[in-house]
Amino acid sequence: MPRKCHPTIRRVIDTPLRVGESPTWDARTGDLWFVDILAPAVLCLRHNGRVDRFDMPALIGSLALCDSGRILVALQTGVHLFDPQTQTLSLLCDPDGGRPDSRLNDGKVGPDGHFWVGTRDEGVPQTGNGRLYRVSPDGTFTEVLRGLNTSNGLAWSADGRTMFHSDSSQQFLQSFDFDPATGGIGPARRLTDFTNAEGRPDGAATDLDSFYWSAGVIGGKLNRIAPDGTITEVYQLPLSGPTMPCFGGPDLKTLFITTLYRAEDGTVEDGTIIAFDVDVAGVPVARFPL
């Protein structure tokens, strides 16, 4: 049985979010970047506590930091480079090509220096049109996976040789052998299937022990999962809609977790960001080399 944990959390922003996602720690500045999918907007919690907001022209699924200080943003209209100084957008590529009932969702830079970004099937009912793409710095891209409903939960082990990936709608976690030099992946290994009570697997992060931390949206949980798929610890959170964790702070031992707006049984929760401290450091997330 997994160990049950009740962390002492703190709320780190007052700005209400609709669907907070993609928290990303900037170790150079001590800033925390994140998105509000439906606003749609890129936001940044500065090290001095100020929250900057940059409105986007289309739904945004995720972001990544670039070497240049720009921000890579996954919009419904494609993958763009955003310059916070000039507040300008430039299109890098549109891997999804404007497919109907689809939008870019969770994305992260892998150990291979490429941006891995999946899509969400927006059809009702979903039909499995989700994809996972690998985007190169020169704007070329390849389709890596298909047959998904909601591609999510991208994260890599500490040695960069295992890639984790989930499907929030089909409620499973899988892993792949990963080649950091080429970005090649091996066959999928089905690790864990989830119930609503355990929390649908949403965004995720990994720690230096290569354990996978999965936001259990709806269930209000953060699940720490061993490399073989065993849930070893369950952190019960005071908000029911956690969407994604990331490790931050000077020692990468602070977990920041985005949440979403929920209204159920007369109770309303605004989306926000909460944080708590842990004993193990996280795996640093790579920057996009542009």
Image: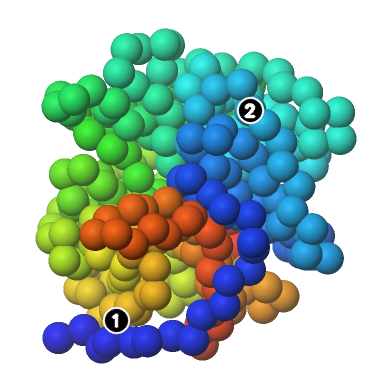
Q: Which residue type carries mark 1?
A: Glu
**Mark 2: few/some/many CA within 10 Å (<14, 14-19, 20+):** many
Whichever of callouts 2 and 1 sits on the residue coming sooner in the sequence is 2
Q: In the displayed structure, does residue 151 sit left or right of residue 157?
A: left
- Closer to us: 197 or 105: 197
* Residue nearer the viewer, 16 or 166: 16
Q: Is residue 281 left or right of residue 56?
A: left
Q: Is residue 176 above or below residue 248?
A: above
Residue located beneath label 2 in the image = 56
Return the mark for residue 233. 1
* Of 99 and 191, the residue lying toward us: 99
Q: Measuring 28% from the left and 38% from the top, which residue is drawn there?
A: 150
Extreme residue in the front direction: 266
Is 269 rendered above or below residue 137?
Answer: below
Q: Report the residue at 71% width, 18% height from top.
A: 90
- The C terminus lies in quadrant: top right
Residue 272 seen in render: yes
Establish if 270 lies above or below 56: below
Residue 276 percent coordinates (x, y): 53, 79
Give the residue displayed 22% in from the left and 34% down from the top. 149
Element carrying mark 2: loop
| Residue 222 position in % (x across, y down) | 35, 70
- State the image coordinates of residue 108 (x, y, percent, origin top left): 51, 44
Quarter of the image with the N terminus is bottom left
Is any atom of residue 107 visible in this view? no
**Amino acid, disc 2:** Met
